[in-house]
């Protein structure tokens, strides 16, 4: 007779102690692959699989929002082949998983500079956003072509516009101060 040892299950955390929003920077997949003698693309594919598991765990635990920082503006400096592989991975993920995400009540959003992406990728993103717009069970935001420098520049520009508009209200078009 053999004895079996039961593996203890981790108890689910108290829902009141869980965050409402989890954000993940998807970094290190290429290094993970390289350390194992694999091509960088293998690491990116493994990371995409981990994302699915992470999203499921978040949903199961009651987390409502997951933001993944998937492709920064710095990533445009990578070799063209790697960028193409990453965009293909995104396209394949959307083709393969969009219906399931939609049926599961996942709302997809994308943030970042979408103008940098190829038209076919943008079209798939637009389709995903439209298809899932009314879903309310879980919110997945994917950051693409994002960067702190870019965010700073946009905020700086918006502040300059606000200041200019305020100056126009104060001084009018003749340069004389309004009361």
Image (tube, rainbow, N blue to C red):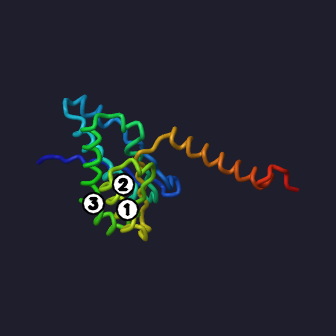
Q: Residues within 10 Å of mark 3 (few under 14, many from 20)?
A: few
Tell me the quarter of the image containing the C terminus: bottom right
- The tag earlier along the polypeptide, 1 or 3, is 3
Residue at mark 3: 97
**Residue at mark 1 to residue at mark 3: CA–CA distance:** 15 Å
> Residue at left 42%, top 40%?
73
- The tag earlier along the polypeptide, 2 or 1, is 2
> Residue at left 13%, top 46%?
2
Q: Is residue 140 above or below residue 5?
A: below
Residue at mark 1: 126
In percent of width and height, residue 1 lies at 11, 48
Q: From the viewer's perspective, is 15 left or right of 173?
A: left
Q: Residue furthest right?
A: 179
In percent of width and height, residue 155 lies at 59, 45
Closer to the observer: label 2 or label 3?
A: 3
Circle 2 SS class: helix
> Residue at left 27%, top 42%?
44
Report how many numbered discs are placed on residues in the image: 3
**Residue at mark 2 to residue at mark 3: CA–CA distance:** 12 Å
In percent of width and height, residue 104 lies at 34, 67
Circle 3 SS class: helix
> Residue 56 is drawn in which quadrant?
bottom left
Residue at mark 2: 55
Q: Residue furthest left?
A: 1
> Residue at left 50%, top 56%?
20
């Amino acid at each position: 007779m053999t004895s079996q040892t039961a593996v203890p299950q981790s108890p689910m955390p108290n829902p009141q102690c869980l965050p409402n929003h989890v954000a993940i920077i998807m970094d290190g997949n290429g290094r993970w692959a390289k350390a194992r003698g694999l091509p960088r693309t293998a690491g990116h594919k493994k990371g995409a699989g981990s994302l699915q598991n992470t999203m499921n765990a978040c949903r199961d635990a009651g987390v409502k929002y997951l933001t993944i920082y998937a492709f920064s503006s710095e990533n445009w400096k990578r070799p063209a082949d790697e960028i193409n592989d990453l965009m293909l991975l995104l396209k394949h993920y959307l083709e393969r998983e969009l219906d399931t995400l939609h049926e599961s009540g996942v709302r997809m959003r994308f943030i970042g500079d979408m103008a940098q992406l190829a038209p076919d990728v943008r079209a798939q993103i637009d389709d995903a956003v439209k298809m899932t717009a009314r879903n309310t069970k879980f919110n997945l935001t994917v950051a693409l072509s994002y960067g702190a420098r870019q965010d700073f520049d946009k905020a700086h520009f918006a502040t300059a516009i606000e200041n200019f508009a305020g100056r126009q209200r104060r001084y009018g078009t003749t340069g004389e101060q309004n009361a």
